[in-house]
Amino acid sequence: MEFWTIPRTTQVTEVVAVLTILVLLSTNGVESRKALANDYFEYSAISCRTHSASLTDFGGVGDGTTSNTKAFQAAINQLSQYASDGGSQLFVPAGKWLTGSFNLTSHFTLFLHKDAVLLASQEESEWAVIDPLPSYGRGRDANGGRFISLIFGTNLTDVVITGDNGTIDGQGALWWEKFHKGKLKYTRPYLIELMYSDKVQISNLTLLNSPSWNVHPVYSSNVLVQGITILAPVTSPNTDGINPDSCTNTRIEDCYIVSGDDCVAVKSGWDEYGISYGMPTKQLVIRRLTCISPTSAVIALGSEMSGGIQDVRAEDIVAINSESGVRIKTAVGRGGFVKDIYVRGMTMNTMKWAFWMTGNYGSHADNNYDPNALPVIQNINYRDVIAENVTMAARLEGISGDPFTGICISNVTIKLAKKAKKVLWNCTDVAGISSAVVPQPCGLLPDQGVEKITSCNFPEESLPIDNVQVQMCSYQRKYL
Ligand SMILES: *[C@@H]1O[C@H](CO)[C@@H](O)[C@H](O)[C@H]1NC(C)=O
Ligand SMILES: *[C@@H]1O[C@H](CO)[C@@H](O)[C@H](O)[C@H]1NC(C)=O
Ligand SMILES: *[C@@H]1O[C@H](CO)[C@@H](O)[C@H](O)[C@H]1NC(C)=O
Ligand SMILES: *[C@@H]1O[C@H](CO)[C@@H](O)[C@H](O)[C@H]1NC(C)=O
Ligand SMILES: *[C@@H]1O[C@H](CO)[C@@H](O)[C@H](O)[C@H]1NC(C)=O
Ligand SMILES: *[C@@H]1O[C@H](CO)[C@@H](O)[C@H](O)[C@H]1NC(C)=O
Ligand SMILES: *[C@@H]1O[C@H](CO)[C@@H](O)[C@H](O)[C@H]1NC(C)=O
């Protein structure tokens, strides 16, 4: 069956049945308790698989202390032979599965039982060190290499990481402490990273306490992220939720994120490295996202945006106790662009700034950035926003001699906090229009008047990623 043309009739349904029968078996007069189980799961995915195995078939032990790194890698190596024969799925049963990093393969599904918890190893030796991303030139925490992600894949096609809301626990506390104390030689690992991959689904999982970013698709296309819960202390360093980075055609929906950094951070490389790599993030859809991020943004564009960011459509966003709703972060030396950004329908409560954009973010990869590489920020549209308990409506700081243009803000009601700032809109080096916005925006976004209320743009035609369908797949297993 052609992967991208699955009919719409296949719908997600509930897990149909999980039968677990515990029986007492008697062997050699010694009574031992054994599970006679018949596991049957249904899940929705971009493609189903012909071959199945369980981690326990490869010596996996779910006791929370035995390392399963070898079991995962042995299982996936074995299953990779089925890539051209209907693909394969690896089931992770209920239990606590301590593991270091492992690599995925193509035409492959990793499925986590709802009571399966992957516990990320805290031993640095369980994590290979890989090269920095070419579009970043260096690791973000330290010069040079970076620890590979817990679940890693590169140059793959058709990969699914899903579950019945099973858990991946990064056990990040030790990494955060090492980071704060400057004790890391390399950049911290992420929980899930797919590089140079096409047709990726990451869905129905809970991600806890990542050492750093949670979900990082990079140089990839046709990426579906659905039904992910991400939880990390709001004080934890750089625990971004989902970071599409130099990706084309990505859809993020129905996610709930509480973290110490941006809930969704859209990226495309850093300064001169990102400019020369030149790979934008484009055609990105974000819907039904709920975010709590007291020191960061619900959706950040940048600050690493040197390959460009174009055509981002965000809808039905809920923000609670976050610093800003949408923030565009850039700097002289970044080059690149952020253009054709559309946000429709945001509800926010307890915010420092409803909107923030800055051309003065700094934070350079090194001192070799080109001071003449000015970012182009253009055609930014925000509409249908209600915000309460807001300290300052907006901070919009463009770059002198390189203004941010084509900003449109319409149908926005911002209710202020008791301790709101005196200046509610601070705008410099920006240009645009507004309509039906309360409180009244700055003079650089002149009100178009009630007679000709114009809604800011939001494209009506769909993107290719909107047409990707999922189908019901199943996993069945008999234990004897
Ligand atoms: C996983 O892939 C990375 C990058 O290709 C490689 O450095 C690492 O050795 C691989 N790990 C294993 C266990 O094969
Ligand atoms: C992965 O794909 C990238 C980009 O196409 C290519 O440069 C790289 O050599 C590939 N790596 C492997 C291991 O095939
Ligand atoms: C998944 O688990 C998380 C953490 O326990 C919980 O907050 C969330 O509501 C669950 N999601 C679903 C869809 O059951
Ligand atoms: C996966 O999550 C979606 C919400 O994103 C939900 O509609 C669906 O029922 C879930 N599927 C399973 C198999 O849990
Ligand atoms: C309003 O925001 C302030 C922080 O600026 C917070 O302390 C307070 O609890 C919020 N009030 C409500 C009603 O949410
Ligand atoms: C204004 O935005 C609200 C949601 O914040 C929406 O319900 C309403 O329909 C919008 N009005 C117009 C005229 O678009
Ligand atoms: C407004 O923003 C500019 C930077 O663009 C800053 O220098 C200035 O202090 C701000 N003014 C207020 C009143 O916050």
Image (cartoon, grey):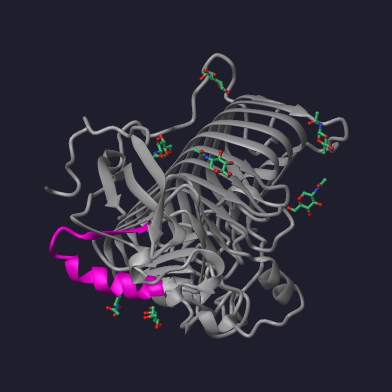
Asked if residue 154 shows in the view, the reply is: no
Is residue 474 shown to the viewer in this render? Answer: yes
Residue 74 on the magenta span: yes
Seen at 67% across and 47% down, the residue is 293
Q: Is residue 335 above or below residue 384?
A: below
Residue 246 vertical placement versus 147 (above, below): above
Specify the quadrant that holds the C terminus.
bottom left
Magenta region: which residues? 71-91
Q: Where on the image, by quarter, is ligand 2?
A: bottom left
Tell me residue 131's x, y (percent).
Answer: 46, 83
Q: Position of residue 247 (x, y in %)?
A: 38, 59
Q: Nearer the viewer, residue 432 or 2?
A: 2
Residue 433 rendering spot, x and y as whole percentages: 57, 33
Who is closer to the viewer here, 179 or 106?
A: 106
Q: Residue at x 32, y 46 (%)?
A: 38
Seen in the picture, residue 290 relative to 448 is either above or below; the reply is below
Residue located at (49% from left, 69% from top): 150
Residue 184 is drawn in which quadrant? bottom right
**313 lies above or below 167:** above
Q: Is residue 251 magenta?
A: no
